[in-house]
Amino acid sequence: MSTYRKSWRPYIGPNDPCPPIEIKYYETPPNLYLGYQPYGLKQFDPSTALFKGTLWPALYAPYSNPYKKKREEEE
Amino acid sequence: MANPKQMPDEFYQWMKQLQEIDFVLVELTLYLDTHPEDYDSIKQFNEFAEKGMRLRQKIEKKYGPLMQYGQSYSGYPWNWDDPPWPWQM
């Protein structure tokens, strides 16, 4: 989920030739918070697992491009 | 030259199930590497391994070998190189 997405604001200098990127994002996937995977986690059924790319919902973290949304707004 | 016979839908369904089983086995293998004492997962792993073997046999009996060098029985005549290959599926 996007809750794993964190952001920071880089310094924007006055002589920046290109349009500055105000907010930079980075992902913190669930396995960082999980540490040692607990026993008996709930599982997807096989066909969903293949589609989602993981057997455990707790580790499912799809990526959506945060910059794309902003670019569409500008266009 | 007649184009090769199209595989029936059943073949694709079975191959998809096989892919699902194999994916679960990959995930469980990675999990069990770090959780060697997890009895339930090992039981689940063996269940899926057996399911995979049975499904592989079912596919090979009807549609020819999936692997080579003795991993699968051969049909007659020698048919391991018949289409579809994995990328042609």
Image: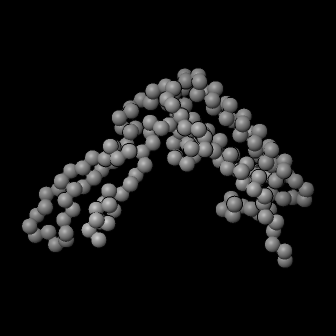
Left or right, B59 with respect to B86, comes to right
Residue at 19% across, 71% down: A18
Residue at 71% across, 51% down: B13
Number of marks in the rendered image: 0
Classify B47 as above or below A51. above
Residue A41 in view, yes or no:
yes
Classify A11 as above or below A47. below
Left or right, B47 with respect to B33, comes to right
Left or right, A57 with respect to B15, comes to left
Residue at 27% across, 46% down: A6
Say which of B52 and B17 sits in front. B17
Screen quadrant of the C terminus of chain B: bottom right
Question: Residue B24, how many percent across, how many down?
Answer: 60, 39
Q: Given the current orientation, which residue lies at the most extreme left position?
A: A14
Screen quadrant of the N terminus of chain B: bottom right
Choose top left, top right, bottom left or bottom right for residue B8.
Answer: bottom right
Residue B30 in view, yes or no:
no
Question: Residue B50, how many percent across, how many down?
Answer: 72, 34
Say which of B8 and B41 sits in front. B8
Question: Residue A22, how many percent across, how many down?
Answer: 19, 59
